[in-house]
Image: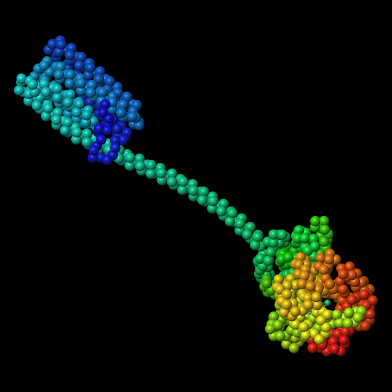
Amino acid sequence: MKSFDENRDLTSSLPITPQMQRDLADMLNRNMFTGLAMTFVAFLGLTFGFGFDTEKDQSSKVLLFIAMNTVIVLRFADGLYWLTRLKGTQYDARPVKFRFAIGVYSTSTVWALYSILLYTTMNAVELATTMVILGAMAGGAASVLAPSKIFVFVYTTSLLVPMSSRALLDDDRNFVVLGILGLIFWVGILASSFRYHRFFFDTVSLKNKNARLIEQMRTDRQETAKINAMLRKSNEQLDDANANLEDEVEKRTADIFRLSNRDPLTNLLNRNGLFKQLNTLIESTKALDNNLAVLFIDLDGFKQVNDSLGHKVGDIVLAEIANRLAQYCEKDHLARWGGDEFVAVTPYATVHTAVAVAHAMRSGVTKPIIALENQITLDATIGIAIYPEHGNDTMTLIQQADLTMYDQKRKQRGTIGVFSETLHEKIKNEQRLCEQLRYAIEKKEFSVHYQPIICADTQKLKSVEALLRWNCNGNIVSPARFIPLAERTGLMPEIGSWVLNRACIDATEWPFNEDIALSVNVSISQLLDETFVNALDKVLASTNIDPARLYLEITESVFANNVNAVANQIHNVKQRGVKISIDDFGTGYSSLSRLQSMPCDFIKIDRSFVQNTNEGSDTIMRATMLIANEFGCKTIAEGIETLDQMNHIKTLGVDFIQGFLYAKPMPLSDLKTWYNENK
Ligand code: C2E
Ligand code: MG
Ligand code: MG
């Protein structure tokens, strides 16, 4: 059997696909039933239509008729099989075509045998009729078998060629003509069947092309649908992700809001949160034409707790204080301003109610706190500012309350103060003073006065304390006033450095012998300034003063500050041979353990004890003497104004004396005169 590929349309670039093979096989089978019927009728007519000349003739015809009918039945059965089982399915066309070929070849063979075997037995009419019928059959086959050129060729050849060839050899010229006509007819049929074939093939190709296009379109549509489904799915996923993202963003925003508005330790509002809250409260208070109080609360004694018991205890204490304060106001009206400072806002409050709330808060704070087995007692100083009396906006109100608290703290810790015009004036003056202080060095308004310190036993000059004086536009401003101001505004390191330099230069001009020491006051901010040791080295080098002759007076209050940094600086100072005096001893906060970690050379008993003749002061002075002895320090009593005070002090065993009894602080020129008069 030849493959369908021989039917390939050479003008088409399309290969013969299985579907095309099926289409061609379908066409052949579809036409086969008519073909078989025609064959049966034709064969029946030819076999029995002309009678039988001889018995041999009869048996040949009947045998051929049986053979043809067998072929027809088999082909019919095969056709039925195709019709019922295969048609419309994706069947393999090759075996179908194979069986069809056998059928065609068999039919052709029977027709060929018929012509060859029975030619001589036919009379003129039968012969002519047979030739006509064969011609008609061949003509019919040209279209029925057109899907396959080989089938047409084999079939029409077997129908026409044997009979026509035999007729050509006939004696009768009429049959010769018929033979010639038969052959011409054969050639014509072949030619037209080949055209048919081309037509069929093109039709099938086109159909397949279309089918493929439709298939392609279907695939494309399916593909598009698939992509659409995927897009829909990813859209849904995107929607989900967006929803999740929105949730996440919302959560993050809440977190950020919490982080940016809340203090993590106490969970109270932080500064940021307070500003927002106070802004809103002020707006609503304004709308209602009402009052509002801002309370600035600063803990007293918290620094010491932190320093002595550690930050862990400090944190517990702050959280506990926050809880206690929250009992007296709305939690969202309470903020941690920073460190141990809190701000509370009480809407609709007059001065009276604000003060009452402040008292309640103080009493809450002063109750003992247990933190990691330590019992701690604190107090609070509170400053109050009222809207709209003391300020119209958030910042001003907080500032006024803060300043009031600060002022209150300076006057008396653990008290409550309300902002007032007097305080406002005082603050304004301080601000003005501050401005002027900034330019005091530049304007050469500072000078240093010196106050002698006398040896109690020998009554000889031991040292001289340098005390800063400020002549501010003709007004002498007390150091007790401007030094704390300079501390607060960060001017102290610069001013202190100027004093140290001036005093050391002056010391080189002293008229007395070189044993006399120079005492210079050093404030906490100056001591802790990172440039301090450098400045000290520079002064020592430039004035060539013996370090052992230089005493630095630091107030006892420095011990309440950053212990390690202070100890470190004292260590640096002592390393250079410079001596340390603890000023105003007994007035501030100090502990024996602190004293031990910060070795000093002198302890100066504050003049408040010297001038107070009560027993308490005496006890403190005696205790101070004991401590000084214990730590190997010499003692200096400040503020001796009378002989009685001096005599009393001497009985306590004080080493050195300083006071108006001997001399007031004086300019360098006067010091020279004083020394000459009192040597
Ligand atoms: P301070 O260091 O305790 O100085 C002693 C203060 O007592 C001086 O006051 C002095 O004039 C005063 N004084 C001395 N003897 C008597 C007396 O018999 N009776 C009375 N009523 N007062 C007496 P001043 O000069 O007003 O200084 C006050 C404080 O200012 C100083 O106390 C010191 O803490 C600070 N100060 C002064 N100059 C400087 C400085 O250059 N740097 C630093 N950091 N502080 C300074
Ligand atoms: Mg002093
Ligand atoms: Mg003093």
Can I make out residue 153 in this image?
A: yes
Q: Position of residue 597 (x, y in %)?
A: 81, 65
- The front one of 482 and 198 is 482
Query: Which of the 4 image quadrants contains residue 26?
Result: top left
Side of 524 where 231 appears, left or right? left
Side of 366 where 532 appears, left or right? left
- The front one of 363 and 678 is 678
Q: Residue at x 56, y 53 (%)?
A: 245
353 shown above or below 46: below
Query: Which of the 4 image quadrants contains residue 646?
Result: bottom right
Q: Position of residue 247 (x, y in %)?
A: 58, 53
Q: Quadrant of the N terminus?
A: top left
Side of 446 where 147 appears, left or right? left
Query: Which of the 4 image quadrants contains residue 647?
Result: bottom right
- The front one of 321 and 674 is 674
Q: Residue at x 69, y 74 (%)?
A: 396
69 shown above or below 518: above
Side of 185 where 412 appears, left or right? right
